């Protein structure tokens, strides 16, 4: 049996009119939950602050759409390092940010956002 939070949808409200907004996200187990959270974030984009409450969140899929809606600029998912520069260059496919480490010990790749 699934915990009750798997069945709960996100809840949003204003804590302070035109000032502070609140979003409770109990689960990411259903893509519709993330969509509801993104819709609320979009709706209150003019708020001075947004409290995102994930206490007791039971998990689910990584909420990339919600992360994008909350971020003011794109972000890289990860950074990879490899001593074998050629391997990492081939892995990058020429996309993202690729650099050789200053000490020559390998290369660093930050994939495209």
Image (tube, grey):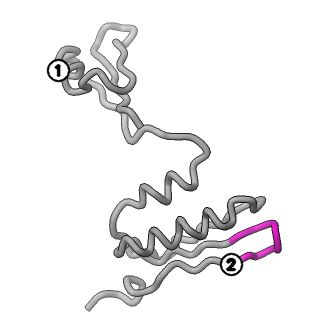
Question: Residue 72's x, y, as percent?
Answer: 61, 45
Label 2: which residue? Answer: 13
Per the picture, the main secondary structure of the magenta-coloured stretch is strand
What element does badge 1 sit on?
helix
Q: In whole angstroms, how far apart are the C-alphas of marks 1 and 2?
A: 49 Å
Q: Is residue 49 left or right of residue 72?
A: right
Q: Which residues are magenta?
A: 14-21
Question: Residue 111's x, y, as percent?
Answer: 35, 32
10 Å crowding of disc 2: few (<14), some (14-19), many (20+)? few
Residue shown at the point (37%, 83%) measured from the top left? 6
Q: Is residue 106 left or right of residue 52?
A: left
20 or 93: nearer the eye? 93
Q: Is 6 placed above or below 52 here?
A: below
First in residue order: circle 1 vs circle 2: 2
Q: Is residue 16 left or right of residue 5?
A: right
Q: Is 113 placed above or below 16 here?
A: above
68 or 102: nearer the eye? 68
Q: Is residue 15 left or right of residue 106?
A: right
Label 1: which residue? Answer: 87
Name the mark nearer the viewer: 1 or 2: 2
Q: Is 12 placed above or below 74 here?
A: below
């Amino acid at each position: 049996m699934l915990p009750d939070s798997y069945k709960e949808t996100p809840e949003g409200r204003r804590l302070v009119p035109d000032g502070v907004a609140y979003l409770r996200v109990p689960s990411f187990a259903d893509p519709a939950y993330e969509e509801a959270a993104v819709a609320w974030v979009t709706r209150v984009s003019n708020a001075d602050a947004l409290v995102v409450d994930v206490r007791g969140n039971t998990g689910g899929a990584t909420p990339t759409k919600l992360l994008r809606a909350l971020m003011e600029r794109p972000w890289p998912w990860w950074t990879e390092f490899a001593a074998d520069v050629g391997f990492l260059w081939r892995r990058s496919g020429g996309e993202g940010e690729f650099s050789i480490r200053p000490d020559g010990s390998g290369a660093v790749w930050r994939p495209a956002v």
